[in-house]
Amino acid sequence: MKLLHIDSSITGEQSVSRQLTASIVGALTRADPALDVARRDLAADPLPHLDLAALPGDTGEAAIASAAVLEEFLASDIVVIGAPMYNFGVPGQLKAWIDRIMIAGRTFAYTAEGPKGLARPKRVIVAVSRGGFYGVESPSAAAEHVETYLTSVFGFIGISPEFVVAEGIAVGPEQRATAIAAADRHIVALAA
C-alpha cells in the first residue's frame, strides 16, 4: 500500500499541522510497517499556480509536472494532508496542489445527473490547525473554510476525508498543548 504525505505549512518546525501529519504517518506506519511512504512538501517545493501550460494535453514542463502530481495522488491508497488555516482558508500552495488533482475525466466527470467522482477509493486524512476557534459550536464557525472546502473538494471526486483538528493554538501555550494532545488522541483512534 502507498501513503502520500503532504505538508503545506510555511512555519517549519513551529507548525502544528506538520507535527500532526508526522504523528498520523508515524501511527499508520507502526500499524502497517510495509506502507510505502512518499512525501511532498508544498512549502519547500511549491507548485506554481495553475495556468494554461499546466493543463492536460499540453506537453511542456508544467504539464508534465502536473501529470506527475496527479499520478502520485491516484496511485496512493492513503493520503495524509497538513492543512493549516491561513486567513480562513487553505494555504495557496495547497490550493495549487488541489488544482493538479481536480481533473475532469480523471478524478471527476460531469454527467446528465450531475458531477460524478472518479477517484478510486482511498483514505484521505487531513490534519487541520487553526489559531482560533472555528468549530461548529463557536461564534466564528461561519468563517471556517478549511474543513468545509476540503470536504467539498474530495467529495466532488468521490472521497470522504477524515479530519484531525487542533484549534485555538494561537490562544496561548496551554491551549496549544491541550489542542495538540486532543488531536494526538484522535490520531491513535484513527490508526487503530
Image (cartoon, helix red, strand yellow):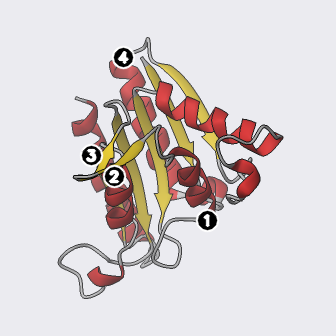
Tell me: residue 87, above or below residue 125: below
Tell me: residue 84, above or below residue 43: below
Residues tagged 2 and 1 counted as in contact (Cβ below 8 A): no
Any mark on residue 174, and which? none
Q: Does any portion of residue 44 appear in the rendered image?
A: no
Any mark on residue 32, and which? 4
Q: Amino acid at mark 2?
A: Phe
Q: Quick one: label 3, few (<14), some, or many (20+) residues within 10 Å?
A: some
Which residue is painted at 42% across and 79% down in the image?
A: 171
4 or 3: tag closer to the N-terminus: 4
Q: CA distance from mark 4 to mark 3?
A: 22 Å
Where is mark 2, residue-wise?
A: 156
Locate residue 135 relative to residue 39 in the image: left or right.
left
Q: Does any portion of residue 80 appear in the rendered image?
A: yes
Q: Amino acid at mark 3?
A: Ser
Where is mark 3, residue-wise?
A: 160
1 or 4: tag closer to the N-terminus: 4
* Residue ranking furthest to the front: 112
Residues tagged 3 and 2 counted as in contact (Cβ below 8 A): no
Tell me: residue 182, above or below residue 31: below
* Residue ranking furthest to the left: 137
Quadrant including the N terminus: top left
Where is mark 1, residue-wise?
A: 92
Q: CA distance from mark 2 to mark 1?
A: 20 Å
Q: Could you tell me residue 41's position as x and y percent?
A: 65, 44
Tell me: residue 165, above or below residue 143: above
**Foreground disc of the pair 3, 2:** 2
2 or 1: tag closer to the N-terminus: 1
Q: Amino acid at mark 1?
A: Gly
